[in-house]
Image (tube, rainbow, N blue to C red):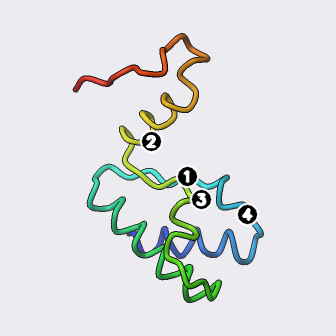
Amino acid sequence: KTRVLTHRIGYMIAVRNARPESIMAITFTNKAANEMKTRLGLLSQTIFHSDSEENLNTRVWIGTFHATCCRLLYYYGEFVGLKPQFRVLD
């Protein structure tokens, strides 16, 4: 599953000219999210001849549902009344 998703992301960027920052991949497990990041880094080296795995990994949002929502709250929480130093309790 992660292979198909990462290749689709690569296709969207390489062929459809999608901006990596406009792509978000949501998974349910940390294992799948980490695997997707690794695969996308390797794909980045192959397709875009990039020396750095971090190239697409830092630009495409890949994470679990919970981690991605938390990241969104850290970035935009002040717009909904959260203080910058808020904490998530789970």
Q: Residues within 10 Å of mark 4 (few under 14, many from 20)?
A: some
The quadrant where residue 68 appears: top left
Give the alpha-carbon distance from disc 3 to disc 2, as whole Å: 14 Å
> Measured along the vertical axis of the image, is residue 39 above or below residue 30?
below
Q: Earlier in the sequence, mark 1 or mark 4?
A: 4
Farthest residue toward the top? 81
Q: Are marks 1 and 2 in contact (CB under 8 Å)?
A: yes
- Note whether 27 is above or below 70 in the view shown: below
Mark drawn on residue 18: 4
Under mark 3, the amino acid is Arg
| Residue drawn 65% across the image and 61% down it | 20
- Sequence-earlier tag: 2 or 4: 4
Which residue lies under the disc numbered 1?
24
Residue 35, image x, y percentages = 34, 68
Please tell me whether residue 86 is drawn above or below residue 58 in the rendered image: above
Mark 3 or mark 2, earlier in chain: 3
Q: Is residue 83 left or right of residue 11?
A: left
Residue holding disc 2 = 68
Answer whether labels 3 and 4 touch (C-beta < 8 Å): no
Q: Residue furthest front?
A: 85
Q: Nearer the viewer, residue 50 or 63?
A: 50
Residue occupying the point 31% across, 24% down: 88
